[in-house]
Image (tube, rainbow, N blue to C red):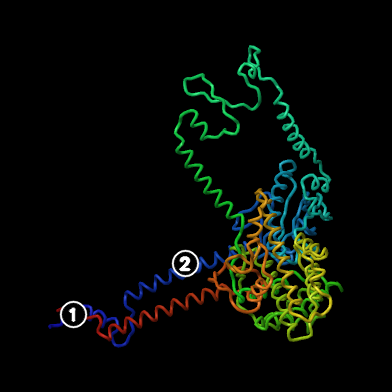
Amino acid sequence: MPIAIDKDRSKRNSKSLQSGQGIVPLEILMMGWMCFLTVAFVTLVVFAVDLAAGSKALYLYEVDGEPKDPVLEYLVKEGKPRFEQNHPIFLWRQETTSYRPPPRVIEFYAPWCPHCQHFVSKYVKMAKEIHAVHPNIEFHAISCVAHHDICKDQGIRSFPTVKVLKEDSYDFNEIKLGEVDAEHILRELGLSNDSVGKTKKNDSKHNNLHEKARDVPFRLRDGRDVRSDQGIQSIPSVKALKEDSYDVKKIKLGEVDVEHFSRELRFSNDSVEKTKKNESKHDNVHEIARVIPFRLHDVHDAWSDAALSFEFALKTGIHMSNGPLSPEEEKAFRDWLELLSKTLPIQMKRTHDIIHLLLKNFSIAVESQSNMDNLISQNIPLEPKRQWHTCTYGDNQMGYTCGLWQLFHIMSIGVVEYNQHNAAIPTRHASETLRNYVEHFFQCEVCRLNFLDMYDNCSFDGCHRLSAQPASTEHEWRELPLWLWETHNDVNVRLMGERMEQNSQVEPNSWESQQARWPSLVACPNCWREDRSWEEDRIFEHLHRLYWHGNPLHIRVEETPHDFDTRYEKIPLSRKIGAIVFGVLLTLALLAKSDKSKIHAGRHKKIEI
């Protein structure tokens, strides 16, 4: 069979590679240009995602450039001197200006705090109510994650904290959360709250008039009483009349709906049926969304999240004011570090290294936040940015508290493991250490008080289940992780109820309360009995598998990264772009090599049969 060679293409290819000069073919040049455009696009996307994620993680009152008026979120301003950033004019008097601040209300919060998230709508609503009467009053919000130094200088030790400052004054009054309402705020500012009071009185007056209206006779111009003329015995009363007819059809109040009216008036109600079906479908989706399912995760996720929250707490939760820790705080912090050093798995090596470093240099670490930061940055190797995986549901603000619970659970299982091979840690000592850590170093005010109330009042029989003496059996040691598990589930149910109340939803029913507890039937089908009670041994086995070793049988789902500003966890944007460019160049090199191979191998020939 004759073989015909495509001489034209062979000539073109030979020109492109003549005498080893390595001239790049047109196709490769075009592909390189497309890759360049792709790199530019990806770079912009990476930058935008980083910016959006960081904003969402740091602030509650201005996310993605959308403020919650009239509340003013205090944002970090690039290029502004650090001193000025840490001393906003509405909090500190500036000697170089004649500015006279108006009356103002300032909330200090942490975006990870559930009750701070719930407080957002209340604060905005109250600000709008007061602004309508006193538009000169300013409402500010300061994120203590983004502005940790400001909150330390202001002595903020719990979230949310609300302060009020009168006009042209920098002396503040702190308002208890239970007293944060429009009338109390105006009273603290020394302003009249008559308008706010009148609004409430008018509402009450309107309701009274509405009630009295039931007894007012309805009369026509000729003096006839409409009710007696129409035979109306009670109010309200509804009647339907067809087109071009005066025959009256009385409708029972229980049947007053669009479908019934359409039937009485002989209109088609097909559209009504469709609308009702759509509304029913929407309501079902709404009901399902009331209960947020738990994300399945493995032991490595738990260790990673716990380690991340441990370091986040060191950065933002230990030194809440300038100067050294108090003697009580020192003891609580040391006890916590010593307990973790014994009970965390060896796989959490970085966390162990930090704990060992802090215990070895404890007197330096407790002196100030800068001392602790310098100890860690100078002695612990830098690490790529990490991310929270578990129970964030795509909301970066929830990562810290969830990871902290992971740390608590790992510690409780670790007590059981440690006691099997060492002098036993009394379960009461471990629980007291945890309690004291929460009291001094967990700043969500409502969360902390609820936990302390539960512990101090022996919830779930903790006073009897947790022994102050070293126990000798694993059954007794297991009471600590089981008690903590019950406590955590109670917190979940309470938070779900608060969330529903915040969203003006009805209270959770028994089924929803059960779904708020974990593990779910999917994650641990043998943990729950038909009467919704739980199997103690199966629950412990699940906790041990989840927080110590072994992986639950499920598909692992990756979660949205959480960003927060630390010197030893953030990957520079340039390194991300560099990795992308390297990948593109490697692809181009492989394509060029492939094209050369085709030419030398003669694959460019045409074969004619």
The residue wearing badge 2 is 41
Report the residue at 18% width, 81% height from top: 5
**From what the image shows, is residue 499 above or below residue 552?**
above
Could you tell me residue 161's position as x and y percent?
Answer: 77, 58
Q: In which image quadrant can residue 454 be found?
A: bottom right
Disc on res. 607: 1
Q: Position of residue 359 (x, y in %)?
A: 78, 82
State yes or no: discs 2 and 1 in contact (Cβ < 8 Å): no
Identified at 79% across, 78% down, the residue is 365
Q: Give above or below for 94 relative to 324.
A: above
Three-letter residue code for mark 1: Ile
> Along the horizontal axis of the image, is 76 left or right of 186?
left
In the picture as drawn, the residue positioned furthest to the top comes out as 222
Quarter occupied by residue 315? bottom right
Q: Nearer the viewer, residue 216 or 262?
A: 262
Q: In front here: 307 or 505?
A: 505
* In this picture, residue 602 sits left or right of residue 75: left
What amino acid does circle 2 point to?
Phe
Image check: 393 left or right of 438?
left
| Local SS, label 1 | loop
Disc 2, SS: helix
Q: Residue at x 65, y 49 (%)?
A: 505
Q: Quadrant of the N terminus?
A: bottom left
Residue 417 in view in this figure: yes
Instruction: Please identify the quarter of the rendering in which residue 232 is found.
Output: top right
Q: Position of residue 61 (x, y in %)?
A: 66, 56
